[in-house]
């Protein structure tokens, strides 16, 4: 039977052919392994987590939908990938994506505090943040610091809460943290909080969802410009291979160039 192994060297002074074969083979195997683990594959659904944050992402009749959701779905379609979508309380979704590899999270605000914790794919939806009050309340805020004398409704670990904490606000002192956004709207209406930090689209959506006219129940008191400059992102935890992030950036760039992204914004905004 013929041998498929390289012959042994004839002299100790020449390199072993088997050794040369292994030296050539190892880099090839490593490259193959990195290629498999570096990008998402069509055969394995990408784990995608979000929260209930209408109209960007929310559950309607058992299906997760919304502006941001449909942008993510368009990216998956462009990349010929499947997604396993899951809606979680924000703090759990945030920690899950931050501590895992290959888990996509959206809609997430990008801040200096979050910058090193995630690998950022790109902007998927616009946003504009305000401190809201009930109409007729005598609030005149000329600076963010002036809001520290009031009770402000936030959601645990969301971008609004993290922003205020980074600017000297304190949970249990001037921040009342909840697990659901709609709870803060109800607290505001009942007078249990003075102010509510929220994205304009979501604030209006939640007011209408409660059967109210947002122009009559919400008053913009102070614009949070630092949270309104870019928009919401999709991102992966910092442990995710760069190749996966680049892959999704390519998909997002494509749908922005071919008009899909603008069409979705027009549909929802």
Image (tube, rainbow, N blue to C red):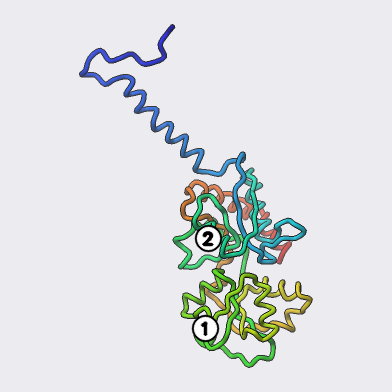
Q: Quadrant of residue 66?
A: bottom right
Asked whether, in this view, residue 146 is left or right of residue 219, the answer is left
Q: In x, y percent, where is residue 146?
A: 52, 88
Q: Quadrant of the N terminus?
A: top left
Judging by the rendered image, the residue that carries numbered circle 1 is 173
Tag 1 secondary structure: loop
Return the x and y of residue 177 as percentages of the image width and height.
58, 75
Q: Is residue 138 rendered to the left or right of residue 19?
A: right
Q: Residue at x 62, y 75 (%)?
A: 198
User: As drawn, is 36 to the left or to the right of 185?
Assistant: left
Q: Specify the farthest residue to the top.
A: 1
| Real-space Cα separation, disc 2 to disc 1, in angstroms | 25 Å
Q: Quadrant of residue 54?
A: bottom right
For this rendering, which residue is in front, 152 or 23?
Answer: 152
Q: Residue at x 68, y 61 (%)?
A: 67
Residue 116, given in percent of the width and then of the height, sits at: 44, 61
Which residue sits at x=69%, y=91%? Answer: 136
Identify the image quadrant of residue 151: bottom right
Residue sitting at the far front: 172
| Residue at the extreme bottom of the image, as rendered | 138
Q: Where does the image place residue 106, in percent across and percent down from the top left? A: 60, 59
Q: Which mark is residue 95?
A: 2
- In the picture as drawn, the residue positioned furthest to the left comes out as 13
Q: Is residue 133 above or below residue 156?
A: below
Q: Earlier in the sequence, mark 2 or mark 1?
A: 2
Is the C terminus in the top left, top right, bottom left or bottom right quadrant? bottom right
């Amino acid at each position: 039977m013929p041998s498929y192994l390289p012959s042994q060297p004839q002299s100790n002074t020449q390199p072993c052919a088997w050794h040369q074969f292994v030296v050539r083979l190892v880099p090839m195997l490593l490259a193959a392994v990195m290629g498999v683990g570096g990008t998402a594959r069509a055969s394995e659904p990408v784990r995608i987590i979000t929260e209930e944050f209408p109209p960007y992402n929310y559950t309607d009749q058992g299906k997760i939908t919304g502006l941001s959701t449909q942008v993510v779905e368009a990216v998956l379609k462009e990349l010929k990938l499947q997604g396993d979508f899951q809606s979680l309380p924000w703090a759990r979704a945030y920690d899950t994506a931050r501590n895992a590899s290959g888990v996509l999270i959206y809609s997430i605000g990008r801040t200096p505090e979050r910058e090193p914790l995630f690998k950022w794919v790109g902007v998927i939806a616009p946003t504009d943040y305000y401190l809201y009050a009930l109409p007729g309340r005598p609030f005149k805020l000329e600076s963010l610091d002036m809001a520290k004398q009031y009770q402000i409704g936030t959601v645990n670990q969301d971008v609004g809460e993290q922003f205020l904490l980074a600017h000297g606000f304190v949970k249990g002192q001037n921040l009342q943290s909840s697990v659901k956004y709609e709870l803060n709207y109800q607290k505001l209406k009942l007078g249990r909080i003075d102010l509510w930090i929220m994205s304009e689209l979501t604030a209006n959506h939640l007011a209408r969802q409660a059967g109210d006219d947002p122009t009559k129940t919400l008053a913009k008191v102070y614009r949070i410009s630092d949270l309104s400059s870019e928009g919401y992102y999709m991102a992966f935890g910092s442990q995710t291979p760069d190749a996966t992030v680049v892959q999704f950036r390519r998909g997002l760039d494509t749908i922005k160039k071919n008009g899909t992204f603008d069409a979705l914004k027009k549909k929802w905004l």
